[in-house]
Amino acid sequence: DLWSTAVLLLTACCHRAVAADTAAEILEIEKATNQSLLWGPYRPNLYFGVRPRVPKSLMAGLLWARVEEYEGIQTNLRHTCEQHELDGYGWNEYDVRTGGRQTIHDPVNKLDLTTEFVKVPGGEHGGNWGVRIKGAPREDAAPDLKSTVFFYVSQEGLGHTTVTNDGDASGFEGSIHMEGSASGLGDFKIEITEGPKSNSHPRHNHPSYEDKPLDKTFVRSIQVREDQLWHVKPILFQNLKVTVDEIIAQYGEDFEKLPPPPQLYTLTNDIGHGNMHMIQKVFEGPFEFDVLYTSDSSPTPMTSDALTKAIKDATDTFSTRFLEVHKPQAPFFGDRFEEFSKSLFSNLLGGIGYFYGDSRTDRSYDPAYEEDNEGFWEEAADAQTRHSAQSLTDPRELFTSIPSRPFFPRGFLWDEGFHLLPVIDYDVDLSLDIIKSWFSLMDDDGWIGREQILGAEARSKVPPEFQIQYPHYANPPTLFFVLHAFLDKLESKSAITSGKEYAKRLLNPDVATSYLRELYPLLKRHYFWFRRTQAGDIKSYDREAFSSKEAYRWRGRTPRHILTSGLDDYPRAQPPHPGELHVDLMSWMGMMTRAMKRIAEFLGESDDITQFDKYETAILRNLDDLHWDSTEKTFCDATIDDYEENLHVCHKGYISIFPFMVGLLPSDSPRMKDILDLISDPEQLWSEHGIRSLSKSDEFYGTEENYWRSPVWINMNYLVVRELLNVAQTPGPHRTQAANIYTSLRTNLVQTVYDSWLETGFAWEQYNPETGKGQRTQHFTGWTSLITKIMAMPGLSADGGRVRDEL
Ligand code: 6A9
């Protein structure tokens, strides 16, 4: 069949040049790659939800609640991820190609749940998949804990799904069977099993039990307006109310006369046509059942036995592969660190989502958007709310990981570059596929929206004033970090990853060339969009720098924030001025220019190489000329004062070490010593829990929102650790100092995130520099997962040599 042919071709591809064979062959391999990514838990805003990477197609999801009381079901029912309602949840193991295991700890419903999701290749439509759902009463639960569990299948777009069990007014024994077809999927079957004999169900003497025994499964087919399909809870409650009304009509409202809660809250069986099918099971004590999806084009059906085997295989594959790529190094040995690192990384992969829908953009091109006169910021206390000339775009798709399932379950541009750094080591093709998805969002000018809030469901999580994207707002170009990592791999500067052929297809030089060649025009468009729209005005700077004009300024600032920079409330020039120059943006431009130059070299674009080389040289020179402050001994923003004089705005912290963080300073740079001293000074950036965002000695330290004004952020700390390692491993005057700082910082960061994880069950958005406690967003599994990479970096001795493994 096609799948095995493709796999054969894949295996062949990387041992000889693909060029010898046909484009058709490459297409086959590409197809297999795509197939293995078709299905996934791509609705990361749900505790468990499945969908394919197809705009309007099949969707499935899970809900559960304890049903021991009449009250509370509305608040206890779990579906979308929310902060502060669980004692921890997430993927302990997850591989996008094969699947993995999630555990969920629910103290209110007194239940521990497991969702084991796997994919089995075969056929032409992404193969089969299955999920085993298990529940176990927690220690403080009564042994006869009564739970109600719903699994739904809904469908958008063309096609249909039908429940094929023979009609039964009360409910069904045995499995529930569905069949259907949907766009991108062809024909399929779904079975929801009864589960093992060990499952038990509540029994009672109320006469209603005779009509509807709770050891049966209840199914209700519902027709819902397509744009309302995501409102699952309200739809479910509406349908439960049908039963409640019937029961009340029959037995009266008196609690004494009503059936017990697990009986009262059951769906009235009603199968037929509908675009949503709700399946309900009621359990007493522990339970287990399977959902088995079979594509009709698959050679074999998905069964519970096949699922058991696939779950075991997925666990084995993941563990082997994870240790090959991200094995924690000295001193982080032992199962506990391994489990911790696996969980961080798995949540990054398990958090990947497929999003589709329209979004709000303001394309009014108001002249004020030039932000070129000083009055702009006085008139607009908040530029974000100033204009409402926004409209909905056409629907777009995005395949991406996300910062946080409960709070920000959507794509953020600069977060994604960080997310993909651990991912590219594990699965090159996946990370480059995500990059492609992001670059496809680019408009004709070269702009990519910072925050991708696609569709009504995504918008429901965001206050209206934060929904609008502006086509002159940037966000750090971190995806170019990932392209650097890709080029490193192609140049074998870092080990070529092992693993499944389809996960490293793009390391084949021919395949890599065609990928980069296809992307190159978009990269250039994006690069020149940055140069054009974020250019700084240096006519008031009486410097050598003037000759090359390389200088930059973030657009979209307000008096209090530069959200576009990503470091929202980090102190900047006051008051805002159109002549401001931002050192972080200049550094990003340097990093991006280098990536462009390397790609141009890879593709042999000689004119472009010359051009990027010229920009690179100018940026490096102007960074020093415009932004280095020799009194403060640090890099600073610059601005123009009331007397039209230019001056530096120095707030020591992440901004002031930016050229170092993005890798623009060579190990023997004359600035290196000052930067290392600043980082390691406890009165400035150093804390026992990582590098602080702002110096302890800065006047704004810990003030106002205190978002980027003291807390420790893992993405920035990762960059610092990475550069320290570089300096420590390169012969030069600062090796020993860098190696020492590296060793302490690496240990402090890992220990901080680990301790907080043990204590709370979660990774956090940021860490308190004084106490080390995780704070702000809970279950922030985005760039905090870079800890996985930090753990996998080598343990060093003071001379920069690797610490021996048995330490
Ligand atoms: C506001 C409130 C339910 C802020 O991780 C995503 C971003 C980072 O890119 C950025 O650097 N976070 C950082 O400073 C979170 C941004 C959340 C904005 C959404 C709406 C939601 O209410």
Image (cartoon, rainbow, N blue to C red):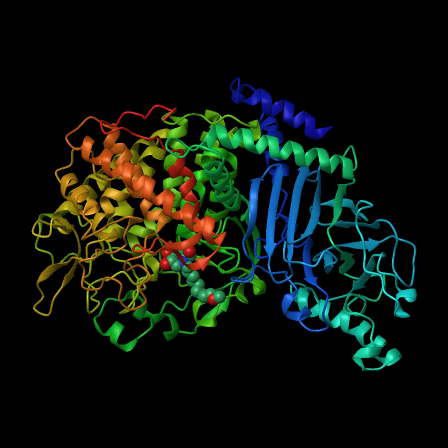
Count every numbered label the image shows and give the total. Answer: 0
Where residue 432 sits in the image (x, y, percent)? 48, 39
Where residue 779 sits in the image (x, y, percent)? 49, 54
Is residue 197 in sight in this rendering? yes
Is residue 302 in sight in this rendering? no
Which one is nearer the viewer's eye here, 715 or 289? 289
Q: Residue at x 19, y 61 (%)?
A: 580
Q: Quadrant of ligand 1?
A: bottom left
- Indicate whether 554 appears above or below 52: below
Asked whether, in this view, residue 54 is left or right of residue 626, the answer is: right
- Indicate whether 59 appears above or below 340: below
Q: Residue at x 85, y 56 (%)?
A: 215
Looking at the rendering, in which quadrant would you find the C terminus? top left
Which one is nearer the viewer's eye here, 668 or 394? 668
Looking at the rendering, in which quadrant would you find the N terminus? top right
Where residue 680 sits in the image (x, y, percent)? 20, 45
Q: Residue at x 64, y 61 (%)?
A: 78
- Indicate whether 446 appears above or below 667: below
Where residue 377 sits in the image (x, y, percent)? 26, 72
Which residue is outermost to the bottom? 253
Answer with the quarter of the image where residue 224 lies.
bottom right
